[in-house]
Amino acid sequence: MSLQEVFEQAQSLPLDEQTKLIKMLVDVIAKPITNSNKHRSLLELEGLGAEIWQGIDAQEYVNQLRDEWDS
């Protein structure tokens, strides 16, 4: 059976069964993604966005934030 034939048969289903079919297909497709055993490390984010902070003195930045709290 070709994909086109399957599609044509699916179109002949009632709307509620088409919806169920879509959910079933999504579950089949999503399964490999959600069952992935690869663990990510927070350390992979190290250095991300570092360019935003270039030229900014950390202590000066913290002091400015604390000054804002007093206002």
Image: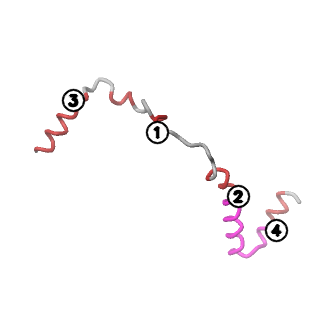
Question: Where is residue 42 shown, x and y percent of the image?
Answer: 46, 39
Q: What kind of element bears circle 1?
A: helix
Question: Where is residue 6 shown, x and y percent of the image?
Answer: 82, 63
Q: What range is drawn magenta here?
A: 9-28
Q: What kind of element bears circle 3?
A: helix
Reading the chain from its start, which is encountered first: label 4 or label 2?
4
Residue at x 70% of width, y 64% of height: 24
Furthest residue in direction top, as rendered = 55
Reading the chain from its start, which is encountered first: label 2 or label 3?
2
Is the stretch drawn in magenta largely helix, strand or loop?
Answer: helix
Name the residue tied to disc 1.
Answer: 42
Q: Are marks 2 and 3 in contact (CB under 8 Å)?
A: no
Q: Are marks 4 and 2 in contact (CB under 8 Å)?
A: no
Q: What kind of element bears circle 2?
A: helix
Name the residue tied to disc 4.
Answer: 9
Question: Where is residue 26 shown, x and y percent of the image?
Answer: 67, 59
Q: Are marks 4 and 1 in contact (CB under 8 Å)?
A: no
Quadrant of the image containing the C terminus: top left
Q: Which mark is residue 59?
A: 3
Reading the chain from its start, which is encountered first: label 4 or label 3?
4
Q: Which quadrant holds residue 58?
A: top left
Instruction: Using residue 32 as the reference point, say whether residue 51 is left or right of it.
Output: left
Rounded to the nearest angstrom, the CA distance separating label 3 from label 1 is 25 Å
Label 1 crowd bin: few (<14), some (14–19), many (20+), radius 10 Å:
few
Q: Which mark is residue 28?
A: 2
Which mark is nearer the camera, 2 or 1?
1
Reading the chain from its start, which is encountered first: label 3 or label 1?
1
Q: Are marks 3 and 1 in contact (CB under 8 Å)?
A: no
Reading the chain from its start, which is encountered first: label 4 or label 1?
4
Quadrant of the image containing the N terminus: bottom right
Magenta run includes residue 45? no
Label 4 crowd bin: few (<14), some (14–19), many (20+), radius 10 Å:
few
